[in-house]
Amino acid sequence: MFYTSIAETQTALAAGEITTVKLVERYLASIGDQRYLNIYVEVFADEALDLAREQDGRRSAGEKLGKLAGVIISIKDVICYAGHIVSAGSAILEDFESPYTATALQRLLDEDAIIIGRTNCDEFAMGSANENSHYGPTRNAADPARVPGGSSGGAAVSVQANTCLLAVGSSTGGSVRQPASFCGIYGFKPTYGRISRHGLIAYGSSFDQIGLLARDPADIALGLEIIAGADSFDATAPNKEVPAYSQSTSTGPKRIAYFPEVLENESVDPAIRQTTADALDRLREAGHSVHPVTFDYFDYVVPTYYVLTTAEASSNLSRYDGMRYGYRSSEAETLEETYKQSRSEGFGPEVQRRILLGTFVLSSGYYDAFYGKAQRARRVIQEQLRAILSEHDFILMPVSPSQPWPVGDQIDDPVANYLADIYTVLANLAGLPAIAIPAGTEPDGHLPVGYQLMADLWKEEELLGFVRR
Ligand code: GLN
């Protein structure tokens, strides 16, 4: 038996129904039984048990415990944790030990969260299926022949398969919402800047945000309340007040926008279109008003995202050069060979493809035609979304046009993977907060289905309050 929320877990611990040590042992056994899912790159078994023992001691001594006492979490392999390896799912960082801890993670630890391990992900968070990992694919617990989504695939399955309660992931273009939806749980990305990126391995810095995955949106609200807010290590996390998200509620009817064009789009899986339409019906019945709106730029969303993120990636990943840290080719003799061979041997094919693309769009002569134009497109996309959100509380739409596909099916077709990001990258392009909401399983099948809600900048409180209502 596994608890499904922080409240349930902490009630059981307070009542003496279970100890923290027993809880950790239960999750460790669950990890052991489900190794075939390839969820974790590394399990911190001894450390988690030591912390649990220590917490049980403090509990029986009547000491005050943190807000996350007894909460077992997983961290995606892109989040730095001092004294632990962080490899970004890449051979180039396979043995790299982090000298410091990410701000968001430190805030969770300070509230007594216990980390059970680091989860598998696409290399440098580049992917939508968790198949671009140096450690092999993670599998969807609802159907192990299928992908769990990506890039936080291990994070999503870590919650789905009951190996922890809360997972810390990251989103550059959908890496929290899409795997959450593929695995039937909640996945949330905040407004750009709401959570410090200090200690998050960079992919596309103007897009990257840490996000949370859980079975209960109340757990996401509490987690966000703890990790959000200014940080002197990240100038993009402004000094804005952090609301008490764990107390957020929603009252009164809301105005909800949707895109009829998406609901009618034949290339969107029928079960997903049905799920989205049903969600709108239920909201209408509950007294909210639902309004069709148009968005003129769907054709430009994926190209804009892939021009800008590959450009940022090519610059961010230039630091992995075989000289400073990470993998160094043992074959290389000269300086130039060291750069070339270390990077050719250390990076996987998808990362190399994106570095090449990003270097191309930034090169002189092409910069204005690609990078400059994509930046202008990003602004236009953001303005139209924010115009919609100035008249509506939320936009409701699918998370992905496709259901989880069989492992290996799309690995040789990067463009098919990129196109499937269309509905998630919108929020990242515009910096908006968004959450994937599970909606059971598809009518004639066994795979999870879901949809997402997006809100205007800094409206996490309204969004989470509404989802929890
Ligand atoms: N699938 C998208 C990509 O490959 C998003 C990944 C992410 O959010 N990290 O870039």
Image (spheres, rainbow, N blue to C red):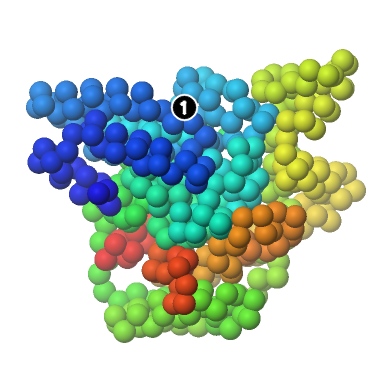
Residue at image position (50%, 46%) is: 37
> In this rendering, does residue 364 appear at all?
yes
**Quarter holding the C terminus?**
bottom left
Where residue 6 sits in the image (x, y, percent)?
Answer: 25, 46
Q: Position of residue 47 (x, y in %)?
A: 36, 23
Residue ranking furthest to the top: 333
Q: Quadrant of residue 306?
A: bottom right
Determine the image quadrant of residue 437: bottom left
Between 165 and 279, which is closer to the camera in this rendering? 165
Tell me residue 411's x, y (percent). Answer: 70, 54
* Callout 1: SS: loop
Q: The disc labelled 1 sits on which kind of residue? A: Tyr
Question: Does the beta carbon of the residue at mark 1 sit less than 8 Å from ligand 1?
Answer: no
Q: Nearer the viewer, residue 468 or 25?
A: 25
Q: Which residue is mark 1?
A: 81
In the picture provided, is 444 more to the left or to the right than 406? Answer: left
Q: Position of residue 156 (x, y in %)?
A: 46, 50
Number of numbered discs visible in the structure rendering:
1
| Residue 201 sits above or below residue 170 on the image | above
Q: Is residue 370 left or right of residue 240?
A: right
- Crowding at dot 1, Cα within 10 Å, few <14 / some 14-19 / many 20+, comes out as many
Q: Residue at x 35, y 78 (%)?
A: 283
Q: Is residue 349 above or below residue 177?
A: above
Q: Is residue 10 left or right of residue 383?
A: left
Q: Residue at x 40, y 50 (%)?
A: 161
Q: Is residue 207 above or below residue 396?
A: above
User: What residue is at 55 percent from the left and 79 percent from the top?
Assistant: 270
Q: Is residue 374 visible?
A: no
